[in-house]
Image (cartoon, rainbow, N blue to C red):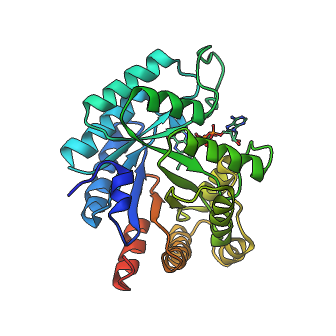
């Protein structure tokens, strides 16, 4: 049975929950390809899937359409993201009303970032400065279950890791009922983050680990720059033995690494594995197959 309130879903689960993140396809060709991706991933039975908002220049309508497709056409449990950057309260209200009408029960509230091509873009004067302000607004006006983002290595704009963690606690105090982490290539970043969360009093809020399989060297480098994830020596050394043009070998390396990360995370009792699919299916399918083969899921 689908439990669309993620906080409730987490309460009832002993094994880690599995979630898959998608972004709205950018054009018709990508949409056609995506159809195949979702039809191969859906049978894995993810506990929920999620749809990004505004990331990489995608549109609001694209997010609505994808949420609708995954929920109503594919029968999946869907979490809708809302990135508040630059958007005024009236627009935020209209987006939330829309998701409410669509039957969405959980909103993952993030600040978002300025568009990369910010020329001609003027943020609304009353837009929310931080995710915590957006969380307060949603909690005050709606009944949604709420999630927020956490950064094991610290957010790239953060004054310090300590300050970043204080702000994360602020997001929990503002209504976030679960946290999904940015991805990392060394689990020690995540375990250290969990310890620091405990230390600051984030004790009862489940934290899901973000997992980003390496899909290609170019994508890995670009995303690491954007997200602030350290490309570890282990990753650099592993990839140095493979030609970056050998796409299959790079992806296979990524699958081995992510599988090893997931196994270790599960052994250490992680509450959930959140896969950044980048709208691709093969790597995630293989990772989950291997975890199921060893009865870890
Ligand atoms: C799982 C996940 C999913 C994501 N999905 C999307 C998406 O769909 N669309 C999208 O556009 N982006 C997405 N992002 C990226 C995200 O929008 C960016 O990382 C953004 O830069 C920060 O968002 P946030 O919600 O963490 O911001 P915040 O929590 O607001 O933090 C932003 C920065 O401000 C600092 N800060 C926070 N509160 C305060 C305060 N009160 N005073 C001073 N400083 C403060 C923090 O330390 C941090 O450096 C996602 C990230 C993750 C981890």
Q: Picture quarter containing residue 46?
A: bottom left
The answer to whether 149 appears left or right of 79 in the picture is right
Q: Nearer the viewer, residue 198 or 242?
A: 198
Q: Is residue 262 above or below residue 2?
A: below
Query: Can the viewer see residue 168 in this picture?
Result: yes
Instruction: Locate the N terminus by quadrant.
Output: bottom left
Residue farthest to the right? 159
Q: Is residue 291 above or below residue 134?
A: below
Residue 148 at x, y percent in the picture: 53, 45
Q: Is residue 10 above or below residue 143?
A: below
The answer to whether 51 appears left or right of 2 in the picture is right
Residue 60 at x, y percent in the picture: 42, 28
Query: Can the viewer see residue 112 in this picture?
Result: no
Residue at horizontal 29 percent and vertical 66 percent from the top: 44
Ligand 1 visible in quadrant: top right
Residue at horizontal 44 percent and vertical 67 percent from the top: 283
Q: Picture quarter containing residue 8?
A: bottom left
Q: In this figure, what is the number of numbered marks? A: 0
Residue at horizontal 64 percent and vertical 32 percent from the top: 116
Residue 282 at x, y percent in the picture: 39, 66
Instruction: Locate the C terminus by quadrant.
Output: bottom left
The answer to whether 102 appears left or right of 235 in the picture is left
Residue farthest to the bottom? 294
Residue at horizontal 66 percent and vertical 20 percent from the top: 119
């Amino acid at each position: 049975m689908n439990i669309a309130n993620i906080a409730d879903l987490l309460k009832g689960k002993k094994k880690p929950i599995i979630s898959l993140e998608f972004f709205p396809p950018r054009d018709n060709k990508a949409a056609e390809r995506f159809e195949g991706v979702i039809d191969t991933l859906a049978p894995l039975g993810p506990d929920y899937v999620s749809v990004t908002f505004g990331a990489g220049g995608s549109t609001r309508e694209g997010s609505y359409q994808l949420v609708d497709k995954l929920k109503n056409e594919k029968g999946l449990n869907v979490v809708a993201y809302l990135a508040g950057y630059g958007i005024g309260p009236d627009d935020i209200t209209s987006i939330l009303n829309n998701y409410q009408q669509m039957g969405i029960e959980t909103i993952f509230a993030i600040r978002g970032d300025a568009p990369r091509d910010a020329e001609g873009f003027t943020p609304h004067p009353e837009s929310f400065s931080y995710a915590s302000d957006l969380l307060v607004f949603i909690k005050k006006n709606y009944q949604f279950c709420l999630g927020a983002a956490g950064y094991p290595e610290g957010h790239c704009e953060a004054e310090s890791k300590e300050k970043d963690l204080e702000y994360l606690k602020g997001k929990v105090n503002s209504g976030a009922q679960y946290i999904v982490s940015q991805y990392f290539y060394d689990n020690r970043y995540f375990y250290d983050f969990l310890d620091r969360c405990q230390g600051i009093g984030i004790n009862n809020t489940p934290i899901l680990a973000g997992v980003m399989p390496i899909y290609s060297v170019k994508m890995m480098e670009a995303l690491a720059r954007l997200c602030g994830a350290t490309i570890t020596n282990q990753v650099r050394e592993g990839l140095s033995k493979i030609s970056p043009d050998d796409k299959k070998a790079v992806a296979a390396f990524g699958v081995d690494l992510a599988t090893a990360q997931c196994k270790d995370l599960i052994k250490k009792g992680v509450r959930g594995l959140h896969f950044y699919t980048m709208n691709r299916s093969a790597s995630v399918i293989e990772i989950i197959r291997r975890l199921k083969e060893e009865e870890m899921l």
